[in-house]
Amino acid sequence: MASPDQPPPQAAHHELRTARNSAGYLLEALELLHKVNPRITLLDVGAGSGSISATLARELQPDGRVIATDVNPDILERARTVAEAAGVTNIDFQQADVLGRLPFDDATFDVTHCHQVLTHLPHPVDALREMLRVTKPGGIVAAREGDLETECVWPELPGMVKFHALTANFIKLAGGTSKAGRQLLSWALQVGSGVHRDQITPSFGTWCYYDSTERKIWAQAMVDQLRIGRLREIGLAAGLGTEDDLEEMATAWEEWSESDEAILGMMHGEILIRKK
Amino acid sequence: MASPDQPPPQAAHHELRTARNSAGYLLEALELLHKVNPRITLLDVGAGSGSISATLARELQPDGRVIATDVNPDILERARTVAEAAGVTNIDFQQADVLGRLPFDDATFDVTHCHQVLTHLPHPVDALREMLRVTKPGGIVAAREGDLETECVWPELPGMVKFHALTANFIKLAGGTSKAGRQLLSWALQVGSGVHRDQITPSFGTWCYYDSTERKIWAQAMVDQLRIGRLREIGLAAGLGTEDDLEEMATAWEEWSESDEAILGMMHGEILIRKK
């Protein structure tokens, strides 16, 4: 990746995410827990460049604390910069891999949260179980996962339709699923660990991008993925598309970003699990 | 249809809709207009059995008023019963067809609203233009339309996948589109009538059904459509499926409604147009 002073070129759109626009389903329950315990702790698993972590930390000021983790230590340097730029100091950073065992004792955190993590994992139920393990009784596990098959783009340029197929295949190639959002309830019911249906609250939320600034950030990130990024490298190697296909997709994103009628939406599954 | 004392058997799920769960994107703007003018009027176009109309009327009590219209006078009798059951009296009912000319003068209403109407129309831009005509300057046109292609069901029983294709083809057969939600912004920009981009606020919202009561209401309505309804009649006549196909779909809905891991979501496009 580039310097932590800049968003990663292929993932600048991730930093459009905030607690309000991407963890709204959690905020009411979080506020209640925070009132009861001002020194609340929240573990953010797979925090990436941390714009959600930092804005969650802001919700927990002054005495609550966020611990932001990611499997990639480089991206956590960017997350540190994002938090500093947001003026947030009640946050720590630690490398951790939810695919294995999280480096925390049982019942450590009041809230354990992830966003767009389980969709990439071959064993999402194991990850949810591990998140539950490190959560205190009475606490909450919260997960929000895109359901890529609900991605909704207008105008529907042929290159955009091809791009959708490429990204769905890319996720599947790594053992993930393009239909994570709709499966969260089912995964939560498979966790075991004493979790029953009445402890689970599912919902759906959306992203919606249409103004010219957001369109440009989003489209540029997609273009970077297609022209210089891992999506290109792996997609070409795996035969998910040709160089010409990828260039058609990149050009389509550029055309989309220039259009006043352009809009992009995606539905996300959301789940709160109250640990007993 | 059956008696107005009961929800229409094939559309009982429509009455799960309320102002809060299906017109939330409008409520803040509506409250502001209502504060300025307590005698606000709202036209609801294509109100169907009117559960959204009645709950919008409740938001406008005591002196605001809703005029609920539908092309089908029978369904308005049910809407009258729904409003009475909700204890709402600031509402009137009138047969009207937004496909032609609405029977109202220019600039009559403070707010003109529709929900799941434009998706069924061959000329949605004309309908939006007609809604704008009857709205006062300074008022609002509000539309919320499903984007059926974002429908998200789990578990994904084969009969459910077939049902999705059947309903999408059914909408297209009547000249509608299964991708209305994502096109609202584009349609609004085509209205003309002096509407510019900065008067338009798009968003996406969702439906989410998963508890056992909602699952049963939803599934029963689908089963009725497949076994006794217009969907069956027209679907069979148009060759959209065989009797065996339809029965497989009905059985799948019954199985889905019994499953604790069952969930259904759909993304809706939403738009507010501020008339100048």
Image: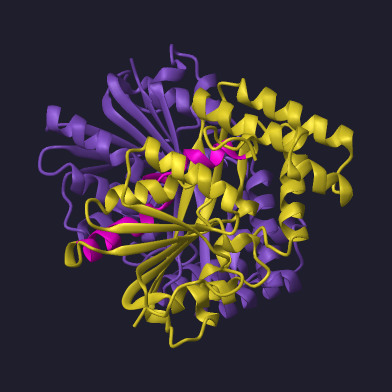
Chain colours: A purple, B yellow
- Tell me the residue at 54%/38% (across/down): B4
Screen quadrant of the N terminus of chain A: bottom left
Residue B260 falls inside the magenta stretch? no
- Asked if A67 appears above or below B117 in the picture, the reply is above
Screen quadrant of the C terminus of chain A: top left
- Asked if B113 appears above or below B20 in the picture, the reply is below
Describe residue B90's horizontal placement relative to residue A65 as left or right.
Answer: right
Describe residue A139's horizontal placement relative to residue A31 as left or right.
Answer: right
Describe residue B237's horizontal placement relative to residue B22 as left or right.
Answer: right
| Residue A87 percent across, percent down from the top left | 16, 57
- Tell me the residue at 38%/64% (across/down): A7
Describe residue B216's horizontal placement relative to residue A272 as left or right.
Answer: right
Magenta highlight: main SS: helix
| Residue A138 percent across, percent down from the top left | 27, 19
Residue A119 visible within the image: yes
- Please provide the residue range marked out in magenta: B11-34
Looking at this view, name the residue that lies furthest to the bottom: B194
Number of marks in the rendered image: 0
Of residues B195 and B183, which is closer to you in this image?
B195
Res B93 → quadrant? bottom left
- Asked if B7 appears above or below A166 in the picture, the reply is above
- Tell me the residue at 20%/45% (across/down): A59
- Tell me the residue at 49%/26% (across/down): B211
| Residue A80 percent across, percent down from the top left | 27, 53
Of residues B81 and B257, which is closer to you in this image?
B81
Residue A258 visible within the image: no
Res A179 → quadrant? top right
Residue B30 falls inside the magenta stretch? yes
| Residue B200 percent across, percent down from the top left | 41, 74
Res B21 → quadrant? top left
Looking at this view, name the residue that lies furthest to the top: A194
